[in-house]
């Protein structure tokens, strides 16, 4: 074990209100600080990981540095930025939502409004609709990329990680991983050439 994962006032993916918007949450940064100190000093861990931070207001992010949080999970924020981006056609979003109504219907709680259900399950449509997103017009991809870059830049500044490349290169040695070609790819290549005549 290298770190302690916690949720102090947050919920994975955010607390979704009946209209599909997200509730404002408050994080107990003092709990983060105290648990982080305990994790480092008593157990030799890296510190604490804050889950569910994607839905916090921008004004909260600099506080994670102040209390020495070792990880802040933000995947939902980036997923939301892409799915809700103005460069994504509304027709694509609606197609995703229709897909969810069929393919994720069993996950809908009786108390969920349609907006809550669609928000909570939208991540399940990312894989099946990945090609749709990757093949958006170039200008749409550029606009989404610029928005992502702006958000990453903001977070890098707030989380105080700008200019840390030298430290990362010195301390993090990513292992080279070599894996054999998957059998499914080998099989599909064989199928493509079988039956071809000279």
Image (tube, rainbow, N blue to C red):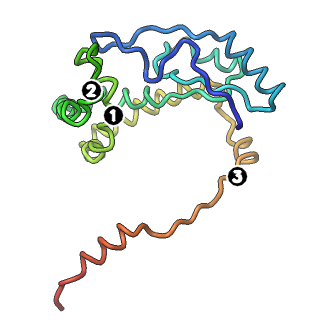
| Nearer-the-camera pick, 168 or 18 | 18
Mark 3 neighbour density, 10 Å: few (under 14) some (14–19) many (20 or more): few
139 is higher (above) or lower (below) than 170: above
Q: At 29% from the left edge and 78% from the top edge, which residue is drawn?
A: 190
Q: At 35% from the left edge and 33% from the top edge, which residue is drawn?
A: 123
Q: Locate residue 179, reporting x and y percent.
A: 53, 66
129 is higher (above) or lower (below) than 54: below
Q: Counting residues from the N terminus, which is met first, the one under dot 2 or under dot 1?
A: 2
192 is higher (above) or lower (below) than 61: below
Picture quadrant of residue 196: bottom left
Q: Locate residue 47, reporting x and y percent.
A: 72, 27
Mark 2 against mark 1, which lies toward the viewer? 2
Picture quadrant of residue 197: bottom left
Q: How far apart are marks 2 and 1 (CA)?
A: 9 Å
Are the residues at dot 2 and dot 1 in contact (C-beta closer than 8 Å)? yes
Q: What element carries label 3?
A: loop
Mark 3 against mark 1, which lies toward the viewer? 3
Are the residues at dot 3 and dot 1 in contact (C-beta closer than 8 Å)? no
Q: Distance between the residues labelled 2 and 3?
A: 39 Å
Quadrant containing the N terminus in the rendered view = top right
Identify the residue position indicated by label 3 in the image.
Answer: 173
Mark 2 neighbour density, 10 Å: few (under 14) some (14–19) many (20 or more): few
Left or right of 43? Residue 21 is left
Identify the residue position indicated by label 1 in the image.
Answer: 143
172 is higher (above) or lower (below) than 24: below
Q: Residue furthest bottom?
A: 198
Q: At 58% from the left edge and 11% from the top edge, which residue is drawn?
A: 27
Q: How many labels does the image show?
A: 3
Identify the residue position indicated by label 2 in the image.
Answer: 86
Q: Counting residues from the N terminus, which is met first, the one under dot 2 or under dot 3?
A: 2
Q: What element carries label 2?
A: loop
| Nearer-the-camera pick, 86 or 32 | 32
């Amino acid at each position: 074990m290298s770190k302690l994962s916690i949720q102090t006032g947050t919920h994975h993916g955010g607390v979704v209100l009946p209209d599909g918007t997200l509730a404002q949450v408050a994080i107990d940064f003092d709990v983060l600080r105290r648990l982080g100190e305990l994790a480092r000093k008593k157990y030799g861990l890296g510190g604490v990981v804050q889950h569910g931070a994607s839905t916090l207001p921008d004004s909260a992010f600099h506080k994670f540095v102040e209390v020495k949080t070792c990880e802040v999970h933000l995947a939902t924020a980036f997923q939301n930025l892409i799915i809700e981006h103005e460069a994504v056609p509304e027709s694509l979003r609606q197609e995703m939502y229709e897909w969810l109504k069929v393919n994720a219907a069993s996950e809908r709680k009786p108390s969920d409004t349609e907006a809550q259900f669609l928000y909570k399950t939208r991540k399940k449509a990312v894989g099946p609709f990945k090609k749709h997103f990757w093949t958006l017009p170039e200008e749409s991809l550029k606009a989404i990329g610029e928005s992502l870059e702006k958000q990453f830049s903001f977070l890098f500044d707030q989380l105080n990680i700008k200019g840390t490349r030298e430290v990362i290169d010195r301390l993090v040695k990513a292992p080279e991983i070599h894996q054999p070609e998957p059998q499914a790819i080998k099989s599909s290549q064989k199928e493509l050439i079988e039956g071809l005549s000279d």
